[in-house]
Amino acid sequence: MNTSKVRVRFAPSPTGPLHMGGVRTALYNYLFAKKHGGDFLLRIEDTDQTRYVPGAETYILEALKWCGIEPNEGVGYGGDCAPYRQSERKPIYKDYALELVNKGWAYYAFDTPEELDTIRKQAEAAKMPNWQYNSISRMTMKNSLTLPADEVESRIQQGDPFVIRFKMPRNEEVRFQDIIRGWVVFSTNELDDKVLYKSDGMPTYHLANIVDDHTMSITHVIRGEEWLPSAPLHVMMYRAFEWEAPLFAHLPLILKPDGNGKLSKRDGDRLGFPVFPLEWKDPETGNISSGYREKGYLPKAFLNMLLLLGWAPSNNQEIFTLEEMIETFSLERIGKSGSKFDPEKTKWFNQQYLRNMPRRALAEMILPTAKERGYDVCVEYLEGVVELMLERAVFPLDLLEGTYLFEDPKSYDEEAVSKKWKKEESGQILLDWSIKLQSLETFNVESIDTAMKSFLAEKNLGMGQVMPLFRIALTGVLTGPGAAQVAALLGKEFVTPRIQKCIETLG
RNA sequence: GGCCCGUUCGUCUAGGGGUUAGGACAUCAGAUUUUCAUUCUGGUAACAGGGGUUCGAUUCCCCUACGGGCUACCA
């Protein structure tokens, strides 16, 4: 086992917004690094110039920041291995590709994409659906293995486009021990001669990945399961370079909640939940994909949900602080199978975190929106609102749902009225109750409750005959926090007029 | 099609040769509550199938089925 300092990386490509599966990969990498006192790097894999999406990189940085996952090194953070953007490292890859050519592990190939396409189509037509550029077919192609040396030389000299391909050996077994899956075995006969260096002068993912992981001293590669099939290629490349390979851990995928398949960008808005941490506006189409942040999810709740989607502790703990996550996390306890994402449970996490937040912080959080809605309130008042609304809120803005805490009810719920309001007596009861309330010196929940009790005794009435009326008068509806609590928060000066108005309106 | 990976309640999962197979979300019922919500209590609900190995398999092995991933000069 490698005793050097743990160094892991999260290496997204900026082809669009980071989706929650990516965030989970980043989280697991981050937790693993922190747990072992190691480094977590952020590398941007932008070797495909055709898939560049403006704003994607900024989005990734911002998303990680929102989640509280902070790299030690990387794009936006600097570090000894800078630059961390592969497009800026372009000059270093060619030498490595050439090194492999010189060692006999790679070769030049001059076949054009069109030619390859034609061959694939022909093969398919001939019922050979899986044509590969490999140890057998390469001898019939245009490359430095089949062309005379001087022709290869002159083609390169005159600037003919070429790629460099890995020369995958035949009849060898590649095996490596995945931390999550155990031994994984492949035969090189199933592997093809992957392009390492593209005709545009850029490396492919495979080359850049290996070179960077090595030069950045990465010790553990923790990435999605979709990379498992190319892991043997990577192992072979480490062998070819004569470098020590890092340890691999391939994470199971996050699946869509309904049906099958991995969770994709489309699923979110189709099923009514975000798949992205932050809202994203597609620069080309202008389409907006919703984000957890904008929907009112707390970053810690989001992270906690992600943590448990594929990983579980040995006890039944569900709620984790970041410190606890770091302390308990281990790659060995990550499950092998894909996990269907459950939006309902995500809400539950949010609710848990919301309840554990200081009242003051919540009040401050909703203050701007309250102002926007035209409520003339201060933070202190909102703290009172939070106190009343918290137990029925999942998102911060749910706390503002009781509009009656900010303005007089505009109408009285029809069903509530028809059920509880009795023309012949309700008005009188409310009027008497109102008089009783006005006589109170201190106006708080306790005094109102006490007054209510004595009122009921005096009039020989039951709770159910008065409270609902009181509630209708104050809020216009039959749901929500206790009427006494609402009244106490509003204050006497608002309560009496509301009762007055109610009596007038409903008779 | 080929290669690789996987399979415990509806969902996320714990467990592991002998257990009443545990928890959480969701769901249902009851209790509390002036209402809603909360809270509490309880319930329904799972080892994909078939072969081995074994005194005994949900647990170990094999096969089948099913699911997923990959199969580009994309990452």
Image (spheres, coloured by chain):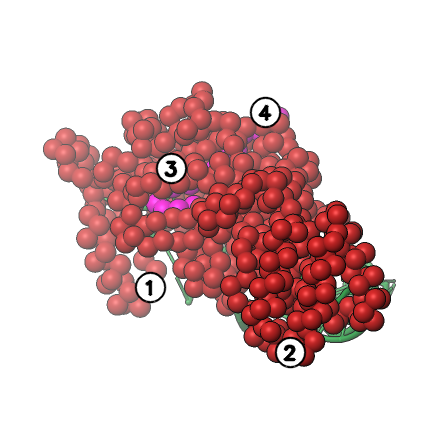
Chain colours: A red, B green
- In this rendering, is residue A281 above or below A122? above
Label 4: state its secondary structure.
loop
- Left or right, A22 with respect to A342, comes to left
Q: Which residue is mark 2?
A: A423
Image quadrant for the C terminus of chain A? Answer: bottom right
Q: Main secondary structure of the magenta part?
A: loop
Considering only vertical position in the picture, is A274 above or below A502?
above
Lower sequence index among marks 1 and 3? 3
Q: Is residue A8 left or right of residue B57?
A: left
Magenta stretch, residue numbers? A2-22
Look at mark 4 in the image and give the residue it sits on: A4
Cβ atoms at labels 4 and 2 below 8 Å apart: no
Classify residue A501 by image quadrant. Answer: bottom right
Q: Which mark is residue A488?
A: none
Q: CA distance from mark 4 to mark 1?
A: 45 Å
- Inter-mark Cα distance, 2 to 1: 81 Å
Mark 2 chain: A
Magenta-colored stretch includes residue A13: yes
